[in-house]
Image (cartoon, grey):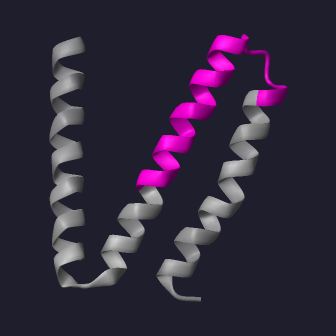
Amino acid sequence: MDNKKLHLLIILISYPITVLHFIFGDYTIEKLISGISFFLIVTVIYVGVVYLFFKNDIGRKLVMCLLILIGIISILLAITTA
């Protein structure tokens, strides 16, 4: 199995499990909608990034820049909120 199919298989397995977790967990309606919406947005971004990564070399460079940017933002948020 190549990497692209593996990444898409992970999405096909993890999305329904996470949605079921929010549905059957002890969450308020507000948190349920917020959690499922967030996970839906993250899933769409993840599939888009996987598509770009395997599309061509420019896509790989774009994904690497995006990952570096996300890493820098995460570090800055961790420092400022600590």
Q: Is residue 82 left or right of residue 30?
A: left
User: Residue at the spot x=16%, y=15% of the render?
Assistant: 80
The number of numbered badges drawn on the structure is 0
Magenta span: predominant SS is: helix
In this orientation, does residue 82 appear? no
Residue 71: x and y in percent read 21, 44
Q: Quadrant of the N terminus?
A: bottom right
Name the residue furthest bottom.
Answer: 1
Q: Position of residue 46 (x, y in %)?
A: 44, 57
| Residue 35, magenta (yes or no) | yes
Drawn side of residue 27 relative to residue 5, left or right: right
* Residue 57 x, y percent position in the rendering: 19, 83
Which portion, as a residue range, is magenta? 23-45
Residue at 69 percent of width and 41 percent of height = 18
Q: Quadrant of the C terminus?
A: top left
- Tell me which residue sits at (35%, 81%) in the image: 54
Q: Is residue 20 visible?
A: yes
Looking at the image, is 22 positioned above or below residue 41? above
Q: In this view of the protein, which residue sits in the foreground, 81 or 62?
A: 62
Q: Is residue 39 above or below residue 60?
A: above
Left/right of residue 25 with respect to residue 81 in the rendered view: right
Q: Residue furthest right?
A: 24
Above or below, comparing residue 74 to residue 16 in the picture: above
- Residue 82's place in the image compared with 68, above or below, is above
Check if residue 33 falls in the magenta segment: yes
User: Quadrant location of residue 66?
Assistant: bottom left
Q: Residue at x 16, y 47 (%)?
A: 69
Residue 27 picture location, percent across and down? 73, 15
